Amino acid sequence: MERVEEHSAGVEQDPTLDRLKDDLRREHEMVLRAMADFDNYRRRVERDRSKVAENAKRDVLRPLLEVVDGFERALAFLSEAPPAVAEGIQAIYRRLMDLIDAQGVKPIKTVGEPFHPAVHDAIGAVKTNDFPPGTVVEEVQRGYRLGDEVLRPARVRVAQ
């Protein structure tokens, strides 16, 4: 109890104690800085991991769109196939489309829409009175979005 009273009574502090307090303050600041650096590192790694996962997802989905295109071409000829074969191909196509849809892939609207170079790839122009100039009149290959990003632009013909 005497020591506490001596300090409160204005007795000078030991210089070693002041140095230790300064050292403790510096160490505390270093720990706080290290914790902040680690938190920033953790967020950066998580963001990078998310980007890698999204890139991998796109890399898997793009080739699947080619398979979808093949199914869509085959569907046009199903009237010539035996009914059991036609039903089987349609069931597989529906399942594939359900899987793609579950991943957030959506088709891009084209016919009747104004041409937009970010989502449409113009492969030709068509003279027509049915659509105003600059409007998509035919979809040659369907385009798709993954969320807000264009996964594959639609290949279209545009009204002149």
Image (cartoon, grey):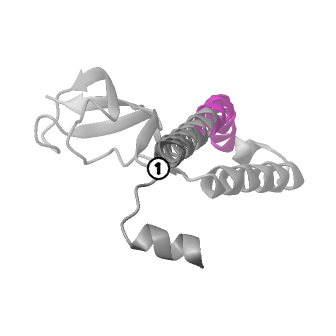
Residue 74 location, quadrant: top right
Residue 98: percent from left, percent from top: 68, 57
Q: Is residue 33 above or below residue 127?
A: below
Residue kind at label 1, given as amino acid type:
Gly
| Residue 32 as seen in the image, left or right of residue 129 | right
Spot the residue most to the right: 84
Rendered residue at 41%/32% (across/down):
153
Of residues 54 and 76, the one drawn nearer to the viewer in this rendering: 54
Q: Is residue 62 magenta?
A: yes
Identify residue for label 1.
Answer: 147
User: For the residue labelled by badge 1, is the local secondary structure a helix, a strand or a loop?
Assistant: loop
Residue 35: percent from left, percent from top: 56, 46
- Check the picture and name the quadrant holding the C terminus: top left
Spot the residue most to the top: 123
What is the magenta range?
53-76
Q: Is residue 158 above or below residue 90?
A: above
- Check the picture and name the quadrant holding the N terminus: bottom right
Residue 83 location, quadrant: bottom right
| Residue 30 as seen in the image, left or right of residue 115 | right
Rendered residue at 57%/76% (across/down):
2
Of residues 26 and 106, the one drawn nearer to the viewer in this rendering: 26
Q: Is residue 52 magenta?
A: no
Rendered residue at 75%/55% (across/down):
95
Q: Residues within 10 Å of mark 1 (few under 14, many from 20)?
A: few
| Residue 159 as seen in the image, left or right of residue 15 | left
User: Of helix, strand and loop, which mostly describes the magenta segment?
Assistant: helix
Residue 39: percent from left, percent from top: 55, 46
Of residues 52 and 77, the one drawn nearer to the viewer in this rendering: 52
Rendered residue at 65%/57% (across/down):
102
Residue 147: percent from left, percent from top: 47, 50
What is the total number of numbered labels drawn onto the structure image? 1
Of residues 44 and 30, the one drawn nearer to the viewer in this rendering: 30
